[in-house]
Amino acid sequence: MLHLNDLQRDALSEVFNISVNQAAAALSEIVREDIHMSVPMVDVCDLPTAVDYLNQGHEVCAIAQKFAGGLKGQAMMVIPEMRSLELVRMMMGIDVPMGALTDIEQDALGEMGNIVLSACFASLADMFDEHFDYEPPQLFWGAIAKLLDKGQDDKMMLLIKIRFSFGNRELDGHIVLLVDGDSIHCLETALNKFLRLIMGDS
């Protein structure tokens, strides 16, 4: 398993901070309200550890996209179910009661996830210097242990904590990249190449 050193972790944090800042700018234009996003934590772990970390005793909303390129797997933006309604209120400008999301409101939530994940794919494409293909986003609700099957012991997780700030409110969620061991090694290779480039090493 890849264990990130401080330099690698800082570089990935910077890459994804750029991604979410771009996503925040796009979302701000849509909702006509200043939205700020940051990445306070990035790490790599195995799947059971990620499930245990993300399992906070409540169901979640996940916007998921399969992708292929230098990395291959599935990306998800994961938000506590109750807090996901706040994002819908922000996107739609309406009050949404629990259990009453219409198809249009679910589409709005899916589009928000698509904007955030697409920005992350763009930054990864820059780091890998290649194109990523990805499928349309899908929306899932339920327990994190069911969404991330613990039986996939060969999978690894790139775990990225994200923080939304809008008005006087804050909301924490996560971006997770579920990939196999070979993709993690590709990530390490690309990350080290990226670090040599920005540090001016040959």
Image: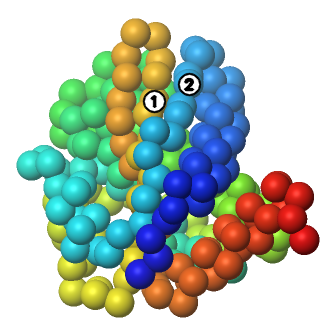
Residue at the spot 49% in from the left edge and 65% down from the top edge? 4
Residue receiving disc 1: 164
Amino acid carrying label 1: it is Phe
The circle on residue 17 is none
- Secondary element at image label 1: strand
Foreground of the two, 72 or 64: 72
Circle 1 crowding by C-alpha within 10 Å: few under 14, some 14–19, many from 20:
some
Q: Position of residue 164 (x, y in %)?
A: 45, 30
Amino acid carrying label 2: it is His
Q: In this view, does 88 lie to the left or right of 112?
A: left
Foreground of the two, 88 or 122: 122
Circle 2 crowding by C-alpha within 10 Å: few under 14, some 14–19, many from 20:
some
Q: Where is residue 27 in the image (x, y as percent from the top left)?
A: 61, 31
Q: Is residue 46 above or below residue 127?
A: below
Labels 2 and 1 touching (C-beta < 8 A)? yes
Residue at the spot 32% in from the left edge and 75% down from the top edge? 46
Q: Which of marks 2 and 1 is nearer the N terminus?
A: 2
Foreground of the two, 131 or 46: 46
Q: Position of residue 137 (x, y in %)?
A: 51, 61
